[in-house]
Image: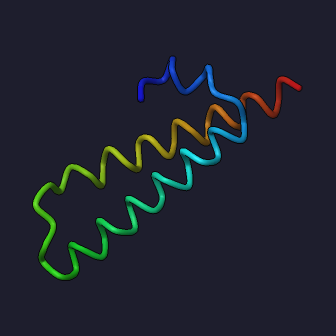
Amino acid sequence: MKITELRNLKADELLKELEASQKTLFEARFKKSLNQLENTAVFRTQRHKIAQIKTILREQERAN
């Protein structure tokens, strides 16, 4: 999802996205330990997405 799409989501939807991203990152770490991970760029993209979601949640929190 792009940052503009994330900004249009509500807090509960953002939390679901955050949970999904964290789960994906965990699974990627697990696959890496088993040498089954093919695309190592998953780490960077998921960490970036998690940071974006947390930033948007904080912005919404401070706006209220």
Task: Identify whether 56 is placed above or below 23.
Answer: above
Residue that protrudes farthest toward the right in the picture: 64
The quarter of the displayed image where residue 13 is located: top right
Task: Identify whether 52 is placed above or below 41.
Answer: above
Task: Identify whether 37 is placed above or below 15.
Answer: below
The quarter of the displayed image where residue 37 is located: bottom left
How many discs appear?
A: 0
Considering depth in this image, is 62 or 16 the residue closer to the camera?
Answer: 16
Residue that protrudes farthest toward the bottom in the picture: 34
- 30 horizontally vs 14: left or right: left
Name the spot of residue 53 as percent of width and height, x first: 57, 38
Which residue is at 30% across, 55% downward? 43
Name the spot of residue 11 as percent of width and height, x first: 72, 36
- 31 horizontally vs 1: left or right: left
User: What coloring was used for the rendering?
Assistant: rainbow
**Quadrant of the drawing holding the N terminus:** top left
**Quadrant of the drawing holding the C terminus:** top right
Considering depth in this image, is 43 or 2 the residue closer to the camera?
Answer: 2
Which residue is at 41% across, 42% downward? 48
Which residue is at 21% across, 73% downward? 32
Which residue is at 51% across, 21% downward? 5
